[in-house]
Image (cartoon, grey):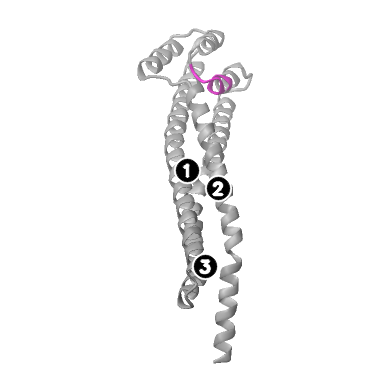
Amino acid sequence: MAGSDILTSTLDLVSQSLQIPVIIFLLLFAVAVIVLLGGLIWEFRNRKTVSNVEMKSLINDISNANSPDEILSVVEGADIPNSIKNDLRDMISSDLDMDSRVALAKKLISSREKKLEKQLSYSDIITRIAPTLGLMGTLIPMGPGLAALGSGDIVTLSNAIIVAFDTTVVGIGSGALAYVISKIRRRWYGEYIANIDVLSDVVLTRIKNL
């Protein structure tokens, strides 16, 4: 029986010792998700979208170009994100042979994908972990709170309930907002990668046929 009491006390000690770290991480996640939201708004205000009509026109202009310099001129004059222009410029201006150009294109696109995935990873982490920490922050103070209820200490119970509700709201709110940010950015980045894939294929095909 004494051994069981020791194990129970140890488990309770470990559980209660996690309360402060959980609250700290929840506050950090709340600040982080606000920063991510600000970044999303900034990105929305500055991002360039390419409509299907514009993309079709650009593809047609590249396909009708008669030299690498003319292809480069078409790309430079296109209303597309500067990062796509930079990658296409590297493919067009390179003195490499065709196979090497293709390898370079794959490398550049892969690098862009990794960079975008890294940006998405921040909000993805908050989406997965914040609600879990919110649940932990809910359950941890309820132990002492229920014990206080048994002894008639309503003040301690009230404080425990307040902490439980606050951590739940912060955890679920941070996770939900991070999820929305991830969904929006994943759609934007998917469109970005699709555009650079198509344009690089068109550019390389035209250079090959010149």
Find out whether residue 105 is within the magenta segment. Answer: no
Foreground tag (1 vs 2): 2
Residue 204 spot, x, y in % from top left: 50, 21
- Residue wearing tag 1: 178
The N terminus sits in image quarter: bottom right
Magenta-highlighted stretch: main secondary structure? helix
Locate residue 124 relative to residue 86 in the image: left or right. left
The magenta stretch is 80-86
Image position, residue 47 (x, y; %): 49, 23
Residue 208 rendering spot, x and y as whole percentages: 50, 18
Disc ID at residue 29:
2
Mark 2 residue type:
Phe
Q: Secondary structure at mark 3?
A: helix
Q: Along the line of sight, which residue is nearer the eye, 73 or 117? A: 117
123 is higher (above) or lower (below) than 106: below
Separation of disc 1 and disc 2 at Cα? 9 Å
Q: Are marks 1 and 2 in contact (CB under 8 Å)?
A: yes
Residue occupied by mark 3 = 156
